[in-house]
Image (tube, helix red, strand yellow):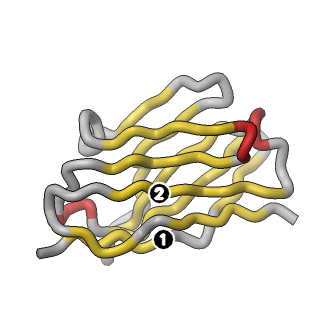
Amino acid sequence: QVQLVECGGGLVQPGGSLRLSCVASGITFSIYNMGWYRQASGKQRELVAGISSGGSTNYAESAKGRFTISRDNAKNTVYLQMDSLKPDDTAVYYCNAALLRGDYWGQGTQVTVSS
C-alpha cells in the first residue's frame, strides 16, 4: 500500500519559515519524480516545486528564490524549505510521487501565513 505522509505545516507570520516533509512508503522512492503542490481556497491546485529522480529541480515563479526542494532517498523523504513566507502562500500543500504510468498523492498539510 502506497502512502505519502506530509508534515510540517502550521501557522507562521509573514517573513517566517517552515519546512515541510513528506515520507513515502510502498514505493521505490528513488525512481520517482517528487513534487510539492498547493491548493488555496477557491483556487486550482498548482505545482510549487519538483525534483526528479536524478535530483534536477524546478520551481514555480512564485517560489523561486524563497523555496527549496530536496530529497533524501535513504529516508524516502522529500522536503520543501519555505522562507520569506507571504500571506499568498497560504494553502494546503500536497506531496506527489510520479512516474509516467501514474502518480500518488499525500493527504496534504495546511500552511497559513498570517500576522
Q: Which residue is found at the position 37% from the left and 73% from the top? A: 10
Give amino acid for label 1.
Thr
**Crowd tier of the residue under label 1, counting other residues whose Cα lies within 10 Å: few below 14, some 14–19, many 20 or above:** many
Q: Position of residue 100 (x, y in %)?
A: 73, 38
| Residue 4 figure quarter | bottom right
Q: Which residue is found at the position 59% from the left and 38% from the top? A: 71
Q: Position of residue 88 (x, y in %)?
A: 20, 62
Q: Which residue is found at the position 45% from the left and 48% from the top? A: 80
**Is residue 114 shown left or right of residue 67?**
left
**Is residue 62 shown left or right of residue 35?**
left
Q: Which residue is mark 2?
A: 20
Please tell me the numbered disc located at residue 109: 1
**Crowd tier of the residue under label 2, counting other residues whose Cα lies within 10 Å: few below 14, some 14–19, many 20 or above:** many
Q: Is residue 24 above or below residue 35?
A: below
Which quadrant is home to the N terminus?
Answer: bottom right
Counting labels gives: 2
Q: Secondary structure at mark 2?
A: strand
